[in-house]
Image (cartoon, rainbow, N blue to C red):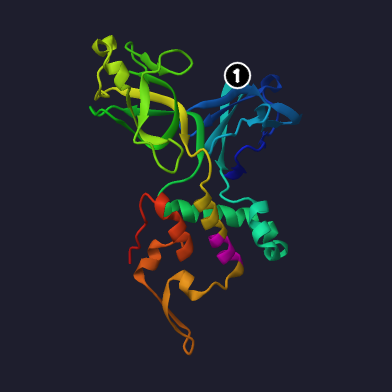
Amino acid sequence: MDEVKINTSKTLTLTLPSDPTSNSVSVSLYHEFGDLVSGPTSATRTGTGVYTITYGQESSGIYILNSSGKYKAEFTYAVSGTTYTQTQVINVYTPYITYEEFFEEYPELEESFGPKFEKSERQVRNIINTFTGQSFDPYNKKTLILNGSNTENLHLPLPIYTIRKVITDVGTTEEETIHDITTSLENLEKVRTGVFNFGSSYYIRWKKSLLDSVNVMLYTNKFKPKTTYSVYGDFGWQFVPENVKQAAVLILADMMNDDSAYRRHGFYAVDLDIVKLQSKQSFYESTGNIDADTLLMDYTLFVMDYVG
């Protein structure tokens, strides 16, 4: 699976033994949440049986791949009256530190490690995600399908910073739009907004002003059980927090230097006579750099434990 940086272009290629009917191949691009991101769009024939599509900018400065996550491209074509579909998957990720930012701080490492930077940065990103129990990615204009639980607050699996549209009873005859920022139908609001995520929240609720009005006869203040809610909005993180960037720099420098002080790696005993290193059990609850752990403390939802 190809790794692609967010807000960049990506070209996908389908290679067939021969051309399909009418030299026609269409491509639909889906986000892992289920949203149709682009298409169906006709692919470009570049040779016999070879078809490409480029996902670049959809408008000035705005890329089609402007949200993190896994994307599935479905190539559809026909041969002798039979329709076929081939799938390619790419992973779009948000760098936690850029090449320029890192080597401005560590210019002496650029010559040796510059060509390996992107691979190492992705590894550091995964370490941070595992340690904190979350990623710091944006998921713009995406949809989550959730079930109500008879509670006043609807819990989301990802923080949301813009509630764009919410539909209830999705896919039934009772389907109804209960919130839409493109109209005056703004009935929902965020609650328990986070300190570090610029007003994002894992919870949404009915606005008190709505429930106090005559509309209280139309709506309940709870998200009803056995009811499906489609929540369309901007999820995740709008930006990578500075502490996360600094932690990424420290861990990345450790990986490249391979000579950090023992204290940064949790060692409490070193016997150079027999080359014996001992570390605390809590080391397995660490990124491998204590300073980085401290920087990430306020962003940690849970810490992975070591199973011996």
How would you rate the neighbour count of disc 1 (Cα within 10 Å): few for under 14, some for 14-19, many for 20 or more? Answer: few
**Taking 222 as reference, is 13 left or right?**
right
Q: Is residue 243 above or below residue 52?
A: below
Question: Which x, y percent locates residue 84?
Answer: 57, 27
Q: Is residue 8 above or below residue 143?
A: below
**Taking 249 as reference, is 275 left or right?**
left
Answer with the quarter of the image where residue 211 lies: top left
In reply to whether residue 104 is colored magenta, the answer given is no
The residue lying at 31 percent from left, 22 percent from top is 206
The residue lying at 29 percent from left, 11 percent from top is 215
Magenta stretch, main secondary structure, is: helix
Name the element at disc 1: loop
- Magenta part of the protein: which range? 250-256
Which residue is outermost to the bottom?
273
Residue that label 1 marks: 81
Question: Which x, y percent locates residue 6?
Answer: 60, 39
Query: Which amino acid is tagged 1?
Result: Gly
Q: Is residue 224 above or below residue 33?
A: above
In reply to whether residue 253 is colored magenta, the answer given is yes
Residue situated in front as seen by the camera: 72 or 154? 154
Quadrant (top left, top right, bottom left, bottom right) of the C terminus: bottom left
